[in-house]
Image (cartoon, rainbow, N blue to C red):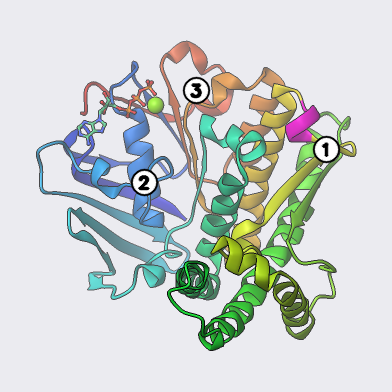
Amino acid sequence: MYIEHLSVKNYRNYTSLEVTFEKGVNVIIGENAQGKTNIMESIYVLAMAKSHRTSNDKELIKWDEEYAKIEGRLQKRNGSLPLQLVISKKGKKAKCNHIEQSKLSQYIGNMNVVMFAPEDLNLVKGSPQVRRRFIDMELGQVSPVYMHDLAKYQKVLQQRNHYLKQLQTRKTKDETMLLVLTDQLIELAAKVTIKRFAFIEQLSQWAKPIHHSISRGLEELAIKYKTTVDNVSEDINMSKMVNSFHEKFEKVKEKEIERGVTLFGPHRDDLLFYVNGKEVNIFGSQGQQRTTALSLKLAEIDLIFSEIGEYPILLLDDVLSELDDYRQSHLLNTIQGKVQTFVTTTSVEGIDHHTLKQADTFRVVSGS
Ligand code: ATP
Ligand code: MG
């Protein structure tokens, strides 16, 4: 798929912008603080209804304005698809094919994007929360069912934590409600964990050969999903998972009441990355961490293609200059001809690869 036309209004430092893009590679050139990332972000937000760099939607609205609007005409295998997202101080409204979507979870997934930005280094060395967010966003775009289950899980988790707090502070002594909420939580926790586990297995299969190749055959990447319940393996099924959770929660009940918080579940899970058997976040060099993050992102492109039969749009913000020539070429050769790609750079000197020389270029100067 590719985005053919983008129009934004009151988005960050853009008052109004209309651009037609190339199906292949688009290079966005501009000095610092001119609005390169903002364009990339607007494309990401149009797809995901969320920014990659902030969870506060109000920041996306141009200062002193009431709302921001992003519109795009997407070209997909089966024709053109107009998308619209309006962000106001009251919330977000999305339209797909001119029809207002009652749920954002239904809207997400119409357009697929993969963003690779300097912050993605945090995927490897940042907190577990960053990795959980990565899984949720990426899995969410290919599985609306997952998004739905996850939202329900988070809601029940909140209710359960609230109830545990009441037991902790002895506002109530009745544990019946806790049992009901625990059952509900376990059902959803099992669904979410199983989907995440399968997703990571799949992503890992795509990432391994990519990493091997980017590291010139020197490194073996392994990715593991780390859960708080034991015995999670390939043959895990719902009933086994539910049983494991029941056992766990039984054991920690008193501790949970004492602390007033849910101690187990997907909200505490993590991802582990190993290069040649060693944990990358602990032992990996800066370059190895970057290669790991890059392999993951490139794997996502393949995974999305295998799931939906179309390549996503790739957004490379500020990353080319961070990669050495070999990795840069590898990246550009991989995407060439099949993935619509957006690349930002501060100067034309940065573009010496033939893929970039043939690309359409756009110059950004203070929001236009
Ligand atoms: P760099 O090369 O440093 O990454 P950039 O071209 O990517 O720069 P952007 O991150 O796109 O720059 O930001 C451009 C400008 O947008 C910044 O000066 C920032 O202050 C401004 N900006 C950010 N949010 C808003 C907003 N809500 N309203 C108006 N301007 C904003
Ligand atoms: Mg930037």
Secondary structure of the residue carrying numbered label 1: helix
List x then y, in percent, for residue 331.
Answer: 64, 33
The residue located at (41%, 17%) in the rendering is: 346
The reply, left or right, for residue 160 in relation to residue 223 is left
CA distance separating discs 3 and 1: 28 Å
**Ligand 2 positioned in quadrant:** top left
Q: Which is nearer the eye, 320 or 91?
A: 91
List x then y, in percent, for residue 318.
Answer: 48, 26
Residue 338 in sight: no
Which residue, given by chain and number where applicable, does mark 3 sit on? Answer: 357
Which numbered disc, 3 or 1, marks the residue that appears first in the sequence?
A: 1
The answer to which quarter of the image holds residue 325 is top right
Structural crowding at the residue carrying mark 1, measured as other residues with C-alpha within 10 Å and reported as few (<14), some (14–19) or many (≥20): some
Check disc 2 and give the amino acid type: Ile
Which numbered disc, 2 or 3, marks the residue that appears first in the sequence?
A: 2
Q: Which is nearer the eye, 358 or 32?
A: 32
Does residue 260 show up magenta in the picture? no
Asked if the residue at tag 1 contacts the one at tag 2, i.e. Cβ–Cβ closer than 8 Å, the answer is no
The reply, left or right, for residue 147 in relation to residue 254 is left
